[in-house]
Amino acid sequence: MKKHKNISLDRLGIVDGMIDWVRVVDKNNIVLYANKKMQEDLGEEIIGKKCYEVLCRNNKCEYCISGTTLVDGSIMRKQYSFGNRTYMIVSSPLYGDDGEIEGSVEVFRDITNEVLLAEKIKEKNKKLNDDIIFAKNMQKRMLPPKGMYNGVSIDYLYESSESLSGDFFDVFEIDENNTGIYICDVVGHGVTASLLTIFVRQSLRTIAKGAIGINKIMKELHKTFLALNLDYDKYFSVFFGIFNKSSFEFKYVNAGHNSVPILIDGKNINMLKSKGYPIANIFDNVSYDVSKVDLQVGDKLLFYTDGITETTNDKGIQFGVENLIKTIKSDGNILVNIKSSVDNFSKVHKDDYAVLLTEIL
């Protein structure tokens, strides 16, 4: 192998065994050396040609990484397509015997398969993202419309930390006198959690239709969930109640929902406490304590998930129930105040949250 000016190209002989293309380009864009693999694949003698001519170009590349390498010795990279192949090219300085940069060593690594795979992944991710957006819109459409329901008026806040939420609530008519109201929190986020919220919605509406025995409804919900035969780490909590517009009685059970609903009677605040296990397949049989409260026109019930109370600020402090109650007691629209308080408390919400406000008419 010859010596070119101040460069001894003999030391490059080792790259003849490489599967990557390797060539040396001087400051005049002349190819001084090309390894065996590159010359065999191109099928022609390229030494002495302009570097860009070898790549079927008439002019110097617009972004010439070797040009930069030859000026300041930087190791540069770029992606380049040649024919039907794509290469990652890395240029490194080659120093002459006098210590000056006399050439740029360019290594062409064929990344065609990686690029094609990345494109396929991108296409699949786009389709998946489109599907998730569709599912998110469907999930929101399944929320009960804001307005009046059989003796109650509802309004709500609903936000998801990811595209799909594990928090959900519903208000539906059981019969002409009774209205079912619930809020649930499915463990986790994303597609799995959102599918379970749909399961809860459809199951409760079907099971509760025409039936007003809350414990019986919850037992059937648990039995239906067990039939899914899911893993032990899949479960959900739910607070479920039935409001009777004739008696103004609200009966309720709590299946592991740690965000205790709040009864707002004017400026008076009462927590609707009740204990019970979440809906999970670690329990063969469940039974819940049924509690009840007599309501009056104008009373409000606030249901929420722990995405509100467990919202954490940059100091690691949670929003908490006390802040929630303080916000409820402040003047103005309750939901507007809650959203404003939570947003001011923490700029980034890492969890889903749902808040359902019902008012007795």
Image: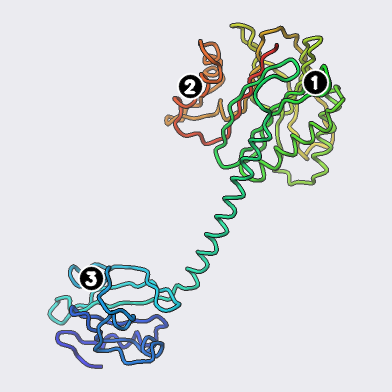
Q: Earlier in the sequence, mark 3 or mark 1?
A: 3
Mark 3 packing: few (<14 Cα in 10 Å), some, or many (20+)?
Answer: many
Q: Which residue is mark 1?
A: 289
Q: Could you tell me residue 53's position as x and y percent?
A: 29, 82
Q: Could you tell me residue 213's position as x and y percent?
A: 86, 22
> Helix, strand, or loop for circle 2?
helix
User: Which amino acid type corresponds to the residue marked 1 in the rendered image?
Assistant: Asp
Q: In the rendered structure, find residue 341 and report the number of the disc placed on it.
A: 2
Question: In the image, which is nearer the foreground, mark 3 or mark 1?
Answer: 3
Question: In the image, which is nearer the foreground, mark 1 or mark 2?
Answer: 2
Q: Earlier in the sequence, mark 2 or mark 3?
A: 3
Q: Residue at x 20, y 73 (%)?
A: 70
> Helix, strand, or loop for circle 1?
loop
Q: Could you tell me residue 286's position as x and y percent?
A: 82, 31
User: Which amino acid type corresponds to the residue marked 2 in the rendered image?
Assistant: Ser
Distance, label 2 to label 3, CA atoms, is: 55 Å
For the C terminus, the image quarter is top right
> Helix, strand, or loop for circle 3?
helix
Q: In the rendered structure, find residue 69 and report the number of the disc placed on it.
A: 3
246 left or right of 67? right
91 left or right of 334? left
Whether tag 3 and tag 1 are in contact, CB under 8 A, the answer is no
Position of residue 85 relative to residue 176, above or below, is below
Position of residue 272 relative to residue 85, above or below, is above
